[in-house]
Amino acid sequence: DSGVTQTPKHLITATGQRVTLRCSPRSGDLSVYWYQQSLDQGLQFLIQYYNGEERAKGNILERFSAQQFPDLHSELNLSSLELGDSALYFCASSPQQLAHNEQFFGPGTRLTVL
Amino acid sequence: AQKITQTQPGMFVQEKEAVTLDCTYDTSDPSYGLFWYKQPSSGEMIFLIYQGSYDQQNATEGRYSLNFQKARKSANLVISASQLGDSAMYFCAMREPSRTPLVFGKGTRLSVIA
């Protein structure tokens, strides 16, 4: 158990819909990262928050947005869903922003768009 | 340009034997970190081992060791005494100090045979 929690574990929805994925980092970790793992793209970084502020952006679509709340949990919002958004979405946390600390991954949310 | 290359899509190893999973990386930054993660069929990402670019010795964690050859830009994972539970996808990743997210390779699927 990494200490990072993600809900829900599975999500099945239809095209055009909007979903919210939730992540609680390890106690004391200030950085939260979101990654998408799909069969064709592999593991891709989406976005990072550090202590409530956006710090880095990767290949995140405009239909996707995220935020980190004062209690440090984070939410990833996916809207106008398309079939290609079906993937495993991971949240990871680390204690510091730039140090070479490992990132601890949550169990992931498997999103299926029908 | 691809930052992390894992050239072995799949590997087989006999139980109790050692196996080496290859990883080469590309960076011009003198400071970086290299990571290996394991992803079993259940989907979670499990941190295995970390090597810093300035570390003098190869990292070891139990049955896992990292064969770090800086001049060759390679960071191979060695698993000794393979067990059936080692069957999983293995991802090599790199983190440069100027870029906070991890960059992953495409992974190697390891199958341990009894």
Image (spheres, grey):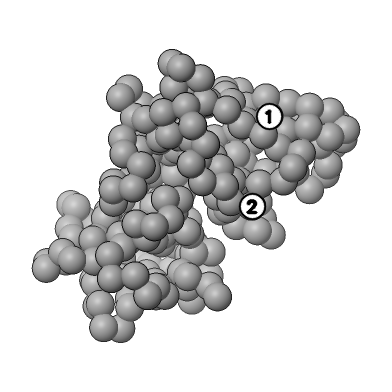
Tell me the quarter of the image containing the N terminus of chain A: top left
Q: Which mark is residue B63?
A: none
Q: Position of residue A3 (x, y in %)?
A: 36, 27
Q: Position of residue B45 (x, y in %)?
A: 44, 44
**Which residue is most to the left?**
B56
Closer to the chain start, of discs 2 and 1, is 2
CB under 8 Å between discs 2 and 1: no
Amino acid type of the residue that numbered disc 2 sits on in the rendered structure: Asn
Q: Residue at x 33, y 47 (%)?
A: A98
Which residue: 65% across, 58% down? A41
Farthest-out residue, top: A71
From the viewer's perspective, tell me whether residue B110 is left or right of residue A111: left
Letter of the chain that mark 2 sits on in the rendering: A
Q: CA distance from mark 2 to mark 1?
A: 15 Å
Categorize mark 1 by other alpha carbons within 10 Å: few (<14), some (14-19), many (20+).
some
Instruction: Look at the picture and state if A78 lies above or below B79.
Output: above
- Look at 19% across and 52% down and name the residue there: B61
- Is residue B14 placed above or below A94 in the rendered structure? below
Residue nearer the viewer, A46 or B114:
A46
> Quadrant location of residue A35?
top right
Q: Quadrant of the C terminus of chain A?
A: top right
**Residue tagged by mark 1?**
A77
Residues flagged by tags 2 and 1 on a common chain? yes
Q: Which mark is residue A59?
A: 2
**Closer to us: A90 or A80:** A80
Q: Is residue A21 left or right of residue B48?
A: right
* Residue A6, percent from left and from top: 52, 26
Q: Is residue A1 above or below residue A55?
A: above
| Chain name for mark 1 | A
User: Which quarter of the figure has residue A110?
Assistant: top right
x and y percentages locating residue A44 in the rendered image: 58, 53
Q: Amino acid at mark 1?
A: Asn
